[in-house]
Amino acid sequence: MKTPKRLSSRFFYDAEGSRLFQEIMHSPEYYLTRSEYEILDTNKDDLLQLFTAGNRPFELVELGAGDGLKTKILLSYFQEKKADFTYAPIDISQSALDGLTADIRRQWPDLRVDPQHDDYFNALGRLSADSDAQASPPRLVVLFLGSNIGNFSRQEANDFYSQINSRLRPGDLVLTGFDLQKHPAVIHAAYNDRQGLTKAFNLNLLRRINRELDANFDLSAFDHYEVYNPENGEARSYLVSQKDQTITIGALDMVVPFRYGEIIHTEISRKFTRTDIEQLARATNFSITGWFTDCKGYFADVLFEK
Ligand code: AVJ
């Protein structure tokens, strides 16, 4: 068995995990969502001008759309301004996608929605192939909001943005939400909320393994532990075994021993400097054509152009 033990943060988002994440986004400590909401709301007109430059129609492709709370600010404004665009949310969760699509069709019956239930790359590849087939293709505008990029290592982020770049044409855009480095105590608090929502979110991984893989984790025998390292900008989440114990995972025919104090690493939430973001753009052949921050300077939505 490898040490330290690890679980991928991809597995957080079953129905209960998605619900807990919604609650985290509303908690007083989790500033990320409010900061990005402010940025999009304040700059929606500038963004529309940039997306429609040259009077081209555009296709708004959102990676990991979730409940689309923040995107709706843009959708609502773009609709009001009668912009010529299609919204293509991509998500691996069919239930999240169905909910979002139904919601949007109810709210804006005239908006063109083209949901893609798929892996990001397959969906992006298909959308760019579709537009290649058109005489005057729409500009692709990729949205990757919420600092979801923080879950990637530096290398993974470079690979991901290079792959996105390879599926775009010159003039296409990517708008990314980056959580910025700031006073470490502010970041620490966001992942250690008083209500225990982040703890429940982290422990839900074990509940999911119990249910889907027939395991017998006792959730009360594990604790949540989060550290933020201001030297490298990494917030890391762990589950900690509170005693010596042995877990069985029926579906995998696996017996997993834990020592008292042993950890499972579950997530990295990376925080960025301006230099980190500039290096990402340069390494993946994008130029930076827009830089938007909230009034506290906690978060940035940055526009990359191919
Ligand atoms: C959805 C990946 C941006 O890392 O801040 C929230 C998930 N984890 N609290 C983040 C999360 C713990 C979140 N992202």
Image: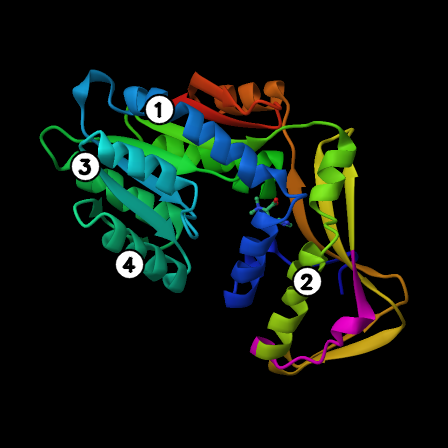
Decide if residue 226 is on the left or right side of residue 40: right
- Residue drawn at x 58%, y 55% as measured from the top left: 23
Q: Check disc 3 and report the residue beneath it.
A: 131
Among the two numbered marks 4 and 1 on one chain, the one whose residue lies closer to the N terminus: 1
Mark 2 crowdedness (10 Å alpha carbons): few <14, some 14-19, many ≥20: some
In 3D space, how far apart are the residues under numbered discs 1 and 2 (Cα atoms)?
Answer: 36 Å
| Magenta residue check for 221 | yes
* Closer to us: 174 or 72: 72
- Residue drawn at x 69%, y 43% as measured from the top left: 190
Quadrant the N terminus occupies: bottom right
Asked which quadrant contains residue 241, the reply is bottom right
In 3D space, how far apart are the residues under numbered discs 3 and 2 (Cα atoms)?
Answer: 43 Å
Picture coordinates of residue 281 (x, y %)?
A: 49, 22
Q: Check disc 4 and report the residue beneath it.
A: 102
* Closer to us: 113 or 109: 109
Picture coordinates of residue 235 (x, y %)?
A: 72, 41
Helix, strand or loop at disc 4? helix
Range of magenta residues: 212-224
Q: Amino acid at mark 1?
A: Leu
Mark 4 crowdedness (10 Å alpha carbons): few <14, some 14-19, many ≥20: few
Among the two numbered marks 1 and 2 on one chain, the one whose residue lies closer to the N terminus: 1
Q: Which mark is residue 200?
A: 2
Decide if residue 253 is on the left or right side of residue 157: right
Q: Amino acid at mark 4?
A: Ala
Depth check, mark 3 against mark 1: the one in front is 1
In 3D space, how far apart are the residues under numbered discs 2 and 4 (Cα atoms)?
Answer: 29 Å
Asked if disc 2 and disc 4 are in contact, CB closer than 8 Å, the reply is no
